[in-house]
Image (tube, grey):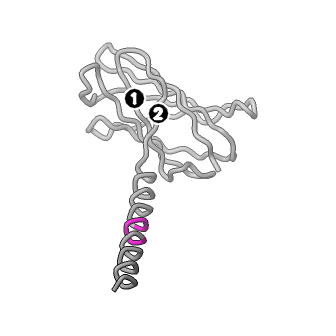
Amino acid sequence: MYTKRFLITISSLALVASLSACNGKANDANASSSGKSSGDLTMTTSFSPNPPKQGPETITVTVKNATSDTVKGATVKIETNMASMSMSGPSLTATDQGDGTYVAHAKLDYATTWTFNVSATADGKSGKMRTTAEVK
């Protein structure tokens, strides 16, 4: 009796640990990063694939105003660079998705730490943020 109960408990713990690991992976795929924003608008970024990999990368920027409402119709630009290599990367203009998110596609050719300087302007308001990502 004791052995059967012990095995059931161990099996239950293994199942919970397995499900937790799956949930962690799902959250990582949708993880977003926020650097330090300044100005009237705040932004968060997310990468796909995440973590960023060498090659094609999709960068999604969410823009919000002071009341945390998403901002539609903004102009969003992303300047990239690789500080450790003293090199600039591509300059990007993100495409408005109509829901407060903006998407840009980049080809990240080097495995290094990339810096993304994001700026947004809309209705006379603006904001900037800087975030970094380790590209493998």
Q: Tell me which residue sits at (40%, 52%) in the image.
A: 27
| Left or right, 57 with reference to 32 | right
Q: Is residue 95 above or below residue 55?
A: above
The residue at the far front in this view is 2
Q: Is residue 129 magenta?
A: no
* Label 1 SS: strand
Tell me the tag on residue 70. none
The residue at the far right in this view is 85
Instruction: Determine crowd level at label 2: few under 14, some 14-19, many 20+ residues with C-alpha closer than 10 A.
Output: some
Q: Tell me which residue sits at (37%, 66%) in the image.
A: 16
* Label 2 SS: strand
1 vs 2, front mark = 1
Examine the image and state in which quarter residue 5 appears: bottom left
Foreground of the two, 101 or 42:
42
Tag 1: residue type? Met
Residue 35 percent across, percent down from the top left: 49, 28
Foreground of the two, 12 or 120:
12
Examine the image and state in which quarter residue 3 appears: bottom left
Name the residue tied to disc 1: 43
Residue 88 percent across, percent down from the top left: 67, 31
Residue 124 percent across, percent down from the top left: 32, 13
Instruction: Determine crowd level at label 1: few under 14, some 14-19, many 20+ residues with C-alpha closer than 10 A.
Output: many
Q: Tell me which residue sits at (62%, 46%) in the image.
A: 135
- Magenta span: predominant SS is helix
Magenta span of residues: 14-18
Residue 24 percent across, percent down from the top left: 43, 56
Name the residue tied to disc 2: 93
Tag 2: residue type? Thr
